[in-house]
Structures are given as C-alpha cells and as structure tokens.
Amino acid sequence: GENVEQHPSTLSVQEGDSAVIKCTYSDSASNYFPWYKQELGKRPQLIIDIRSNVGEKKDQRIAVTLNKTAKHFSLHITETQPEDSAVYFCAASKEVGSFGNEKLTFGTGTRLTIIP
Amino acid sequence: DGGITQSPKYLFRKEGQNVTLSCEQNLNHDAMYWYRQDPGQGLRLIYYSQIVNDFQKGDIAEGYSVSREKKESFPLTVTSAQKNPTAFYLCASSIGRLNYGYTFGSGTRLTVV
C-alpha cells in the first residue's frame, strides 16, 4: 500500500519568515495530494490540494509543489503569522475503479510554531 | 459542525466494555472513514466505507467494528478486544469520486478509566 513520509516533525520559524514542509510518497499511481491544518483540539481542515497533472498551485501565502518523478511534494507558507501555528498533515490517494478516490494515506504531521 | 457530526465529544470506557462512537453526515457523501489519532503517529485508518452496506478494513482494524446501514451514518464500535483504545477518533466523509478531499468531524476523545 501507499506510504507517506513527512519531514520535519517539528518546525519553528520567526514570524514573517517562510516555512517549508516536505512529503514523499511510495505509490506512483497516487494522483491527489491534499494538505490539512489542525489547530490544537480541533478537526483537520483542508488548506490546499494538488493533482498530478499540475506541478504547482498557489493560494495567497500558501503554495504546494509536486515532483512526480521524485515522488515528493511540499507545502510552502510565506510571510508566516502567529495563526499559522498548528500541525500540518500531508496525504496522498489514487483513483480506484468506479469508486473514484481511494482512502487517503496521511503523513505523521509537522508541528509548526511561529515565533513572534 | 460543517455537515459532519461526531458524538460524544468525550467518552470514558471501563476495562472490558464496548463503546460506540457516532458519526453522521448530511453532505450526501458516498464515502466515510474512521481514523485514529495518537501523538506523533498522525492519522491511522481504522475502517472505511465507499458505499452503503459495504466497508473495508483499514490499517488498524483489530478490536474495532463498524456498520453502514444508511448513507448518512457510520458508527464505530470500540470493543474490549482493543487493548489500547485511548485516543482521539476522527470521522471523515468524501464525495468518493474525482479525488476530492475529506470533510472531518470534530472528533471524539476516548479515555479508558
């Protein structure tokens, strides 16, 4: 099955600097890569996603890049703010038959702390 | 809760007791999922269902059971066979087609007492 590795497990950056979180996946058939943000005690929420036919996607201060050849994708947060402090999870899935997307396999998470 | 509701928010289980966690969605999503979250281990899949009356084991199904009798509901039972049930349990749903992301419930924190 799919295996997703995520690094680093913890990351501290000064407010205003950029943060980068990296994930690798094992199944070359995976074609959907979402990122979730989970604030303390709350549910994970989708912040951005990318499909395998796209190399980069940006939404304001957040961007995701995908390298299918190397089987890795990254989350980039620019101009970080205190409210960006949270745990971030990457995930991967692929389409399976008539059901569409298969289950998501998640990375182990990155705890991002923004230092004021 | 954004269309997917988990209850209760906190649950305490005695040794040897079965407990059932509720998950209900009104998003008309076909697929539903149960994940367990432990510190430092991310989200691990327990069971998932892509259609009513059908479900599949995930990576850590031992000691758990589910049913999917209605599209809206996917309850999870934590049985006495689950030796380390203390965790945060998250239910999610998705359209099930075209690789759309999940919508998560707010979670149930289960503690063994």
Image (cartoon, rainbow, N blue to C red):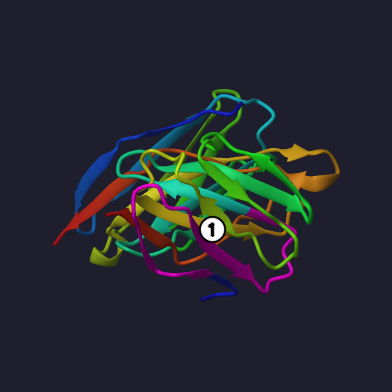
The residue at 34%/54% (across/down) is B14
Give the class, few, some or many, for how many residues have Cα within 10 Å of label 1's Cα (few <14, many ≥20). many
The residue at 54%/34% (across/down) is B59
Q: In this view, does B38 lie to the left or right of A116?
A: right
Residue position marked by numbered label 1 in the rendering: B91
Q: Position of residue B79 (x, y in %)?
A: 49, 47
Numbered range of the magenta stretch: B6-32
The furthest residue to the left: A116
Instruction: Work out whether residue A101 or residue B29 is closer to the camera in this orientation and state it.
Output: B29
Q: Position of residue A96 (x, y in %)?
A: 77, 38
Tell me the amino acid under the disc marked 1. Cys
| Residue B67 part of the magenta segment | no
Q: In this view, does A72 lie to the left or right of A22?
A: right
Q: Is residue B30 left or right of residue A28?
A: right
The furthest residue to the front: B16
Instruction: Work out whether residue B14 or residue A93 is closer to the camera in this orientation and state it.
Output: B14
Image height of B58 relative to B28, above or below: above
Instruction: Work out whether residue B112 or residue B89 is closer to the camera in this orientation and state it.
Output: B112
Which corner quadrant of the image does residue B4 belong to? bottom right
User: Where's the C terminus of chain B, which quadrant?
Assistant: bottom left
Q: Where is residue B43 in the image (x, y as percent from the top left)?
A: 45, 44
The residue at 54%/53% (across/down) is B77
Chain for disc number 1: B
Q: Where is residue A3 in the image (x, y as percent from the top left)?
A: 52, 28
SS category of the residue bearing label 1:
strand
